[in-house]
Amino acid sequence: MEQTKKIYFASDVHLGAPTISNHLAHERRFVRWLDSIKPTTSELYLMGDIFDFWFEYKKAVPKGFTRLLGKIAEFTDSGIPVHFFTGNHDIWVFDYLPAETGVKVYREPLIINLDGKHFFLAHGDGLTSHEKTFIRIKALFTNKLAQRLFRLVHPDLGIRLAGFLSRKSREKNMAEDGSVFQGEEYEWLVSWAKEVIKTEHFDYFIFGHRHLAQAFQLNQNSKLIYLGDWITNFSYGEWDGSEFQLKFFKE
């Protein structure tokens, strides 16, 4: 990697979320960040829940997001790889998004070496038994028959239903643990990562999902990074070839 180039990571933008009051301003802010990093970007990792809901019907996709989709295509057209992880909110990405924007889609965690460091990359959902309910829901949502049946629902109704379920899910999550640090011993992804490194070394675990912008030192040689979100934190990760930093977008 060129010395001046960096790898960037962002997650949990939740474009189109029913709890966001100004969707256009929300999208524009994220696109301005993309503009600001483009000159120094060698690769971009979008780590899940970029959209609050996404479903590709045969002849339709959710309305909006044109600025983001155009900006992603601008990155890939200029030769910058963009890696897109499906999260628990945008699990229904199929062929349209990669075909139109050039992103590479990941539905499972990715283990990769960057500049000699061992990375474990994932949105962070469904990795542990803590999220038993979601694991069951994910099994349903990834079922081919269930996807075909949902495609029979008119997009106006399907997207309205998705917005209702998204709001209820967020209310439930906030009531239970929300985007609040639970204490290191109760952060299930931290506990899970500590178990993993007992048998396999990783220099970095990079997760979204929790909406926390926080780093944890798992042991002397391993760190876990929560990337935060773009609803309250406007945070992102930056890898410069030797150090991973958690940063915040300020205009």
Image: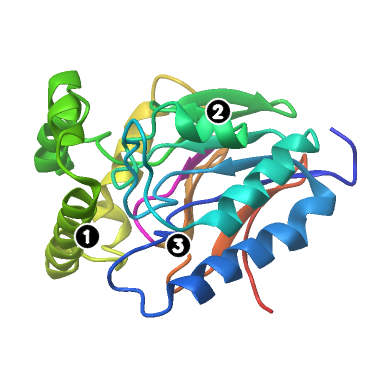
SS under mark 1 = helix
- Tag 2–tag 1 contact (CB < 8 Å): no
Q: Find disc 1 in the rendering and name its residue.
A: 163
Sequence order check, earlier mark of 1 and 3: 1
Three-letter amino acid code at disc 1?
A: Gly
Queried whether the magenta region covers residue 141, the answer comes back as no
* Quarter of the figure that contains the N terminus: top right
Residue 22 vs 219, above or below: the answer is below
- Which residue occupies 34% across, 30% down? 58
* Quarter of the figure that contains the C terminus: bottom right
Mark 3 and mark 2: Cα distance apart in space: 26 Å
Point out residue 182 in the picture as x, y percentages from the top left corner.
26, 63
Sequence order check, earlier mark of 3 and 2: 2
Mark 1 and mark 3: Cα distance apart in space: 19 Å
Closest to the camera, between mark 3 and mark 2, is 2
Q: Find disc 3 in the rendering and name its residue.
A: 229
Mark 2 and mark 1: Cα distance apart in space: 26 Å
Q: Find disc 2 in the rendering and name its residue.
A: 99
Instruction: Judge from the rendering whether residue 203 lies leftward or rightward of residue 13; answer left or right.
Output: right
- Residue interval drawn in magenta: 204-211
SS under mark 3 = loop
- Which residue occupies 46% across, 60% down? 228
Asked which quadrant contains residue 102, the reply is: top right
